[in-house]
Amino acid sequence: MAMEAPQEELAYVAIVSPPGSGKPDAVGVMDVSPDSDTYAELVGRLDLPNVGDELHHFGWNACSASLCPNMPHPHVERRYLLFCGLRSSRIYVIDTKPDPRNPTVKRIIEADELAEKTGYSRPHTVHCGPDAIYINALGTPDGGGPGGVFMLDHETFDPKGAWEADRGEQHLSYDFVWHLLHDTMITSEWGTPDMVESGVVPELLLGRKYGHQLHVWDVNSRKLKQTMDIGDDNQMVLELRQARDPRKTYGFAGVVTNVENLSGSVWLWYQDGDDWKAQKVIEIPAEPADAEDLPPLLQGFGAVPPVVTDINLSLDDKFLYISCWGTGEFRQYDVSDPFNPVLVDTVQIGGIIRKAAHPKSGELNGGPRWSRSAATFYPEGVKGWAIKVNASPEGGMSLDEDFFMDFGDERVHQIRLQGGDSSSDTFCYPN
């Protein structure tokens, strides 16, 4: 049913104001209907009431997980978007109805309330779960750790408390996903607030201090079952995308960079008997470049790292998409056999060296999926823009030449489709 749903007409985007501008961040409404007279234009905008939030990820209050058997909220409407301010620790509950082009603020959860009720700070990623809205936090109010996951009530949006009952030695936090039919949660690692609030810290990166582990949790007991360490040369294991078919017990994790050779990678986690294992299935090498063309951090390497900042898995579990923010490359892999991915196609846009243009733009820096570490890799600054890539069900991609949105000095981050998307839903019912 999700795959057969009609094409969305609108999409929502997090708009981050330039540092020091004194302007608030905003929620943008994008026209993504090709037949519309305002296609690829911003048709709505909600400026938030505070300055300095630094929006990153956001998500829907309800999704397919709400329909799981015996769940207490089977009739929750997919209506509210929850935006997290990574610097302010605020959470905005945004109502997309009655007019989807003019969203409004329903509630603001302030940092003090979040800290008092959960012990956490710096909320980041939102996923709607079967019994609550789940959000991860990078750490504690003092800027340290541990980071973890907390819950909000589906209807009142009141913080319900930290999720973990026994975290063992887990300390760092980033993304989280479920294998709901197998009572399993997987979490990944980035860094504590002190480690990430100024972007990537070269000393911490080269000192291998950022996250490099995957954690396996028992959903019922909320206890850590197992930790998979993929090696501290692999720094920042971030985005997680589990198989969409709920009967399958595998998924993919994106790793930003390897400090030995600057490659990016994707790792497959999978269940093997009673154990869970992880292995590297995709490696994307760094591209050689002249040192004088590189930012200071990279000059000693003489190469441009791909900088894997995002991955996504199609609803049929066939294609994996990888955003390479450093090289400006967007990759499509056939992962029908998840242990043996095959590169199908690439699209070039932006990049530290390449600066690949869109047909409606001049040279572009930055790349697919903006990263918080812009100044480290793009010291000249990054402009905000959004594009659309058309992907064939049989494989292959192409830039939509009519879709280019220029946001100027504002940066845009995550995008959510009006009807939900493959990374916003967790399924209980197989096809």
Image: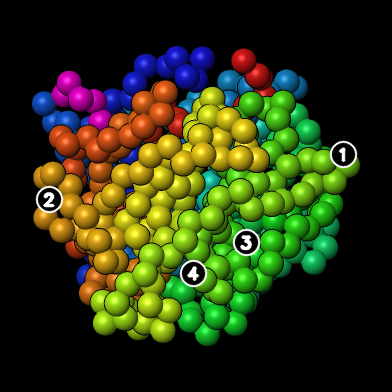
How far is the residue under mark 4 from the one under mark 1? 34 Å
Tell which tag, 4 or 2, sits nearer the viewer: 4
Q: Which mark is residue 273?
A: 1
Q: Is residue 103 above or below residue 428?
A: below
How far is the residue under mark 4 from the one under mark 3? 18 Å
Where residue 116 appears, as percent x and y from the top left, is: 64, 63
Q: Which residue is mark 4?
A: 262
Q: Amino acid at mark 1?
A: Gly
Q: Amino acid at mark 2?
A: Ser
How far is the residue under mark 3 from the one under mark 1? 25 Å
**Residue at 35% across, 52% down:** 329
Where residue 210 appears, as percent x and y from the top left, is: 60, 71
Using a 10 Å C-alpha cutoff, classify the residue at mark 2 as few (fewer than 14 neighbours), some (14 to 19) or many (20 or more): few
The answer, for residue 170, to whether it is visible in the render is yes
Q: Amino acid at mark 3?
A: Glu
Using a 10 Å C-alpha cutoff, classify the residue at mark 4 as few (fewer than 14 neighbours), some (14 to 19) or many (20 or more): many
Q: Is residue 232 above or below residue 360?
A: below
Q: How many marks?
A: 4
Q: Which residue is mark 3?
A: 189
Q: Is residue 344 rendered to the left or right of residue 246? A: left
Q: Which residue is mark 2?
A: 361
- Asked which colour scheme the image uses, the reply is rainbow
Please state, as top left, top right, bottom left or bottom right, where the C terminus lies in the image. Answer: top right
**Residue at 65% across, 40% down:** 339
How far is the residue under mark 4 from the one under mark 2? 29 Å
Closer to the chain start, of discs 4 and 1, is 4
